[in-house]
Amino acid sequence: MTDYCRARMALATTMLLGGTTTAVLVGAPAQAAPTPLDCGSGPVVITDSTASYELVGTCTAVTLKGDNLTVTLTSATSLVIKGANDKVTASGAVGKIKVGNSHAHITATTVTKATLKGANNRLALDRVTGRVRVKGANNLVRIDKGAKLTVKGANNTARYTRLATLVVRGANNHVKVAKGKTKVSVHGANNVIRVHRRR
């Protein structure tokens, strides 16, 4: 039982017994600081769950196998997420991103390429120099500038500011490109595609 729960129980007991003690509770206790983890010496694999980490240094390969992880890092050559409900924030560039489970939230600046195979994932990137592949369902992709997007799943949503090439091979997907010219190829039912200009 946490200290917060003990304090609430003590307050309730005091009130029930008619005591005169006054207690003031201000919110829940503060979250623990992320655990620092040096990733400059080689690949990092995180297997535990419900934890928060700050990866320090320039990372090579980072693999998350646990669930409910919160990870911050500067940069990495690759990021693989096998757990569920993981949140990753990269302040710099990430080489390759691969998500194979569900409910991951990833934020980064520049990425070489990304693959989403699971469901209900969120990907927010500034720039992708290679291809983004979406093979799952109910994923949300928000990218400022991208080279190519391939969607093979269903019920996915993608929002780009600029996108050079779009390929859709699924159903009920929604893609919007706000600026520039986009080469478009669409096969499947009930897809909603809005691009600024086709080329």
Image: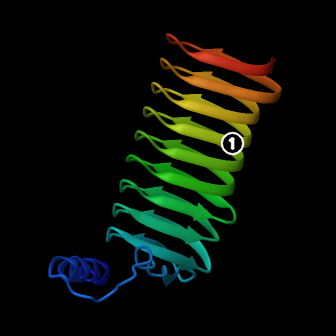
Outermost residue toward the bottom in this view = 21
- The residue lying furthest to the left in this view is 17
Q: Who's the residue at 67% across and 66% down the image?
A: 91
Residue at horizontal 46%, vertical 66%?
70
Would you call the spot at circle 1 few (<14 residues within 10 Å), some (14-19), or many (20 or more)? many
> Would you place residue 149 above or below residue 14 in this image?
above
Left or right of residue 115, residue 160 in this image: right
Q: Of helix, strand and loop, which one carries label 1?
A: strand
Please tell me whether residue 185 is drawn above or below residue 131 in the rendered image: above
Residue 72 drawn at (x, y percent)? 56, 70
Q: Amino acid at mark 1?
A: Ile
The C terminus - image quarter: top right
Q: Position of residue 156 (x, y in %)?
A: 51, 29
Identify the residue position indicated by label 1 in the image: 143
Residue 6 pos. (x, y %): 24, 82
For this rendering, which residue is in front, 155 or 62?
155
Q: Is residue 118 above or below residue 94?
A: above
